[in-house]
Amino acid sequence: MSEQQTGRLYGVGLGPGDPSLMTVRAVEVIAEADVVAYHSARHGRSIARSIAERHLRPDHIEERLVYPVTTETTDHPGGYRGAMEEFYADAAARLAAHLDAGRTVAVLAEGDPLFYGSYMHMHKRLADRYPTEVVPGVTSVSAAAARIGAPLVEGEEVLTVLPGTLPEEELTARLAATDAAAVMKLGRTFPAVRRALERSGRLAEAQYVERATMGAERVAPLAEVDPESVPYFSVAVLPSRIDAQAPARRGEVVVVGLGPAGPMWLTPEARGELAAAEDLVGYTTYLDRVPKRPGQRRHASDNKVEAERAEFALDLARRGRRVAVVSSGDPGVFAMATAVLEAAAEDPYREVPVRVVPGMTAAHAAAARAGAPLGHDYAVISLSDRLKPWEVIAERLRAAAAADLVLALYNPGSRSRIWQVGKARELLLEHRAPDTPVVLGRDVGGPEERIRIVRLADLDPAQVDMRTILLVGSSQTRTARRGDGTEIVWTPRRYPER
């Protein structure tokens, strides 16, 4: 006698609510099924069943999978998670009994079965044991975008889908960094989601869609929605920025730190400001690191015209433009924030709003690659004598070295400045031992990254250029070679008593 063949499991996406948005395949599967299963709260009503109701037959075996808890508390010894795990295990066992008896089981799911859907908990417990097919459905995100009547994403834009249950700080960061977004699971989370949209500067763009494609559908600007009226089945949407009608606002300048290299070093805030800007202003090399966006204007210039660049950006803002001035690393560390603020402190720019968005500094990036050389007190000095006399630089080097501070040396050399590193080495050797560790970090985060650790006495100026930063240890800085062969350097946090 041959073994009885098991039944087949289907996860059936029903779309966002309108029965006419069910796929042909979803209708076919329900028609073929012996068992139709669906989730519901303890009140017994199931949105999934109501969507598919016209396709149910009297001879269908219906399995109602009733959640033991939704928003209320539970006395289960394992708490909410324990109660739900027990429920999913029991529900999977009930469906397995039908499958073992050779019956075809269709588990109904609003939207798409594998997009925040309840079906996935059955799938994870049964799909490796039974033949399974997932029938995709139209998601609530797609339905909401259709109801808003605006493109969701276009071109190279990025769509981020977020659960409203995330911590508010995390929501704020992700909303600030993305192009377009959909925030699910509103209801009780709506006040925090609204605050996150406001803090990220995106509230004016946000649209609210409630019960998309259903009878009680509502669409409105999210800022106008009463938090007490928001049900779970609603979505907050930030549609495409391309060709969107920007809300009326006063022009401003935002000085943005790009970090030492590419997109991996950008903060979410910086990413969001770059996306929101109408005009980008900066040194050509740094502008090239910012992805091009339709509708944005880019104004590139030489590296030696900081004051002119700052005034140009402020003039654009006076005409109502939202301007991002880009800077490598952190804009306040030997970079464009000072130039912009100096100009903004004078007429006719005193009334132009200016903000500074920080970025990862070259010193911190190089330090992290080498270990922790900046683990104790340190000083940051630029070796460039283009804007200050070498005598001042030499005096500061001696003072910092005498104080036994770790040194982060920016702008150590260029094609027109080739002697400063050698002179700095001589000055430092007056106060530091020859074997003091020096970290040479070149193109940190970039394709030509190289990190080397040398003795101060062996520091070769020929191996240092404008793309290199030097981290010179104190008397306490240590090095060690680890088991994998890599050399690390660190400065202890404890300093010996004299």
Image (cartoon, rainbow, N blue to C red):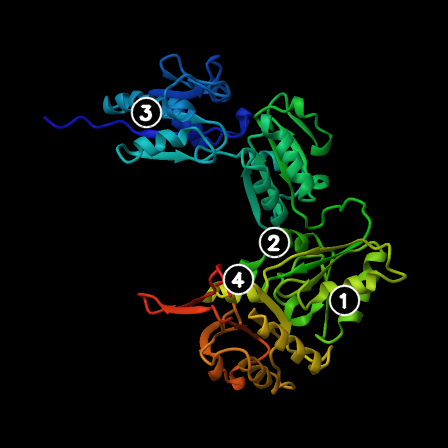
- Between discs 1 and 2, the one toward the N terminus: 2
Indicate the quadrant where residue 261 lies: bottom right
Circle 1 is placed at which residue position? Answer: 339
Q: Which residue is mark 4?
A: 376
Closer to the N terminus: mark 4 or mark 1? 1
Between disc 3 and disc 1, the foreground one is: 1
Residue 155: mark = 2
Q: In this view of the protein, which residue sits in the foreground, 2 or 66? A: 66
Question: Looking at numbered disc 2 in the image, what kind of residue is underneath it?
Answer: Gly
Q: Residues within 10 Å of mark 3 (few under 14, many from 20)?
A: few
Instruction: Answer with mark 3 or mark 4, whichever residue precedes in sequence.
Output: 3
Is 495 situated above or below 404? above
In this view, the mark in front (2 or 3): 3
Q: Residues within 10 Å of mark 4 (few under 14, many from 20)?
A: some
Image depth: mark 1 or mark 2 in front = 1
Dividing the picture into quadrants, the one containing residue 303 is bottom right
Q: Secondary structure at mark 4?
A: loop
Three-letter code, disc 4 = His
Q: Which residue is mark 3?
A: 89
Indicate the secondary structure of the residue bearing disc 1.
helix
Secondary structure of the residue carrying tag 3 is helix
Measure the C-alpha gap from mark 1 to mark 2.
35 Å
